[in-house]
Amino acid sequence: MTDDKRRRHSAPVVDGIGKSASRAMLRAVGFTDEDFKKPQVGIASTWSNLTPCNMHINRLAEEAGHGADEAGGKSLIFNTITVSDGIANGTEGMKYSLVSREVIADSIETTAGCEGFDGLVAIGGCDKNMPGCVMGLARLNRPSVFVYGGTIEPGENHTDIISVFEAVGAYAKGDMDLIEVKQIEETAIPGPGSCGGMYTANTMASAIEAMGMSLPGSSAQNAVSETKLEDCRAAGAAVLNLLNRDIKPRDIMTREAFENAITVVIALGGSTNAVLHLLAMASTVDVELTLDDFTRIGERVPVLADLRPSGHYMMSELVAVGGIQPLMKMLLDAGLLHGDCLTVTGQTLAENLADVAPYPDSQNIIHDLSDPIKKDSHLRILYGNLAPTGAVAKITGKEGTRFTGRARVFHSEEEAQERIMDGTVVKGDVLVIRYEGPKGGPGMREMLTPTSAIMGKGLGSDVALITDGRFSGGSHGFVVGHITPEAAEGGPIALVEEGDEITIDADTNRIELRVSEAELDRRRQAWQPPAPRYTRGVLAKFAHTVRSASEGAVTDRF
């Protein structure tokens, strides 16, 4: 056995006469005698040609492998799955989306744990890839770097995937004809890369960079660019530096690092999914993080980025003016980030940001701290008799901060979508979409299709939507998700009846059902849990093992 501490995991697999068969297998995939003496670096690729978010990642994985090899390691590339939220949204297939996060984490842990990799690079593109990859790396706790696959370029006329979803609502309203919708459909997605606004993919990539698990700049690069190829090569080399210094994910993913991630997500106006995924990643490394931490940090951190979906600009435009590094420098100088957190460079966050130049004066994407878009967080954690253990809202204030309306109750996303499109849903309604939670769905689908239809029909300020499901990063409007306990567990959202009055208040962070406690008790006594929608397979397994959304909807905590 070796005394090279960098090979503590691969040595038991390949060293000594007893491992001759292992070496024979690896010779067939290209190992030489010298390679057996090197630290092995697994490159976890989420490549697939089923979605533009991931269609280019095979090239990125090869570059990461070259970087690791040139730095003195021996790389091996393996794949995980990916699914496409943009394709599956509004269908039964979307129930597999959040499940894919767990499958990705499981597959990275399984492959690397079995093969004895000493270090890892993981490359993600679509929404669940990012947290899934980082959770897999964190479970193993071996020197690791996460690489973001990069953002897509804007489509024709500054369009993106959300433009297509909202065009469908505009058609239903009569503001667009089929030819106009088809023109947007044909040109909104011009090539590789993740969806172009500050939706979930760009949000999570930014959060992971702020946490210190990606190299500086990785979250704000175009998918097809020399910069992204260089990022991948540098990530491969960085793993060897981490191995030399024995720096592992749990050294980086501290409570303070998660607070940095939350701060950057808020400043960027990021997705509500960040709440779910950051809670899950924190659980993986046994860092205590709760919904209330988002409220506490949100009281002092403003929204500074004028990015879609509620703003005007796309991620590629932020890339052009410097990405998120100048923003992080602003936040650090204002005392809003923990500068002493360790990162995958081997340096602290403050050291990484020391020489970062400010944004050019001509840019309008990132506002100054003295001129925020919103003085506090757009991510609101709500409590009340409808959400005793919490709910997550994304309220920018553009549609107001308080809404009272009458409940219109649906037991699935499809039911709600039909009633929006046919005009049944009208001004003053609060759409209640229930039995879409982690257990009840199962899978906690995103409600992007109905929220986009609401916006497309011009009802964004006049209709609210609440659910025990969740939202795409592309959703905007008066929306509240992650309501817990969920309906399938008998949570109060299961007791709402048609016409009940509901108030959502983002100033006091309350969500209340205006029904007496006596009446709720009567309804509770009459309520019966629905039969499981799936009794076999991965969705049934997810429903059986998943924790509450307020705990990150993880499946490996018992």
Image (cartoon, helix red, strand yellow):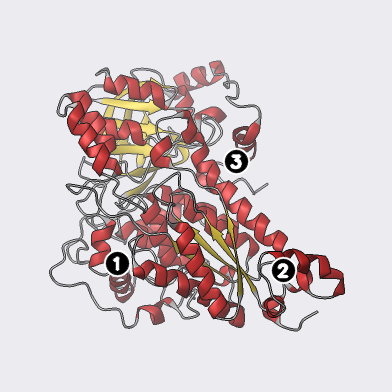
Q: Secondary structure at mark 1?
A: loop
Tell me: 135 left or right of 264. right
Q: Nearer the viewer, residue 387 or 223?
A: 223
- In the image, what residue type sits under mark 1? Gly
Q: Quick one: 77 or 283, which is closer to the camera?
A: 77
Which residue position is annotated with label 2? Answer: 27
Label 1 – label 2 distance at C-alpha = 42 Å
Q: Is residue 383 visible?
A: no
Please tell me which residue lies in front, 190 or 371: 190
- 541 up-or-down from 251: above or below: above
Give the CA separation, mark 1 to mark 3: 35 Å
Q: Are marks 2 and 3 in contact (CB under 8 Å)?
A: no
SS at circle 3: loop
For the residues bearing labels 1 and 3, Cβ distance under 8 angstroms? no
The numbered mark, 1 or 2, whose residue comes first in the sequence reads 2
Q: Measuring 30% from the left and 52% from the top, which residue is drawn there?
A: 196
Residue annotated with mark 1: 323
Residue ID at (81%, 79%): 1
Corner quadrant of residue 178? top left
Tell me the kind of residue under disc 2.
Arg
Dividing the picture into quadrants, the one containing residue 31 is bottom right
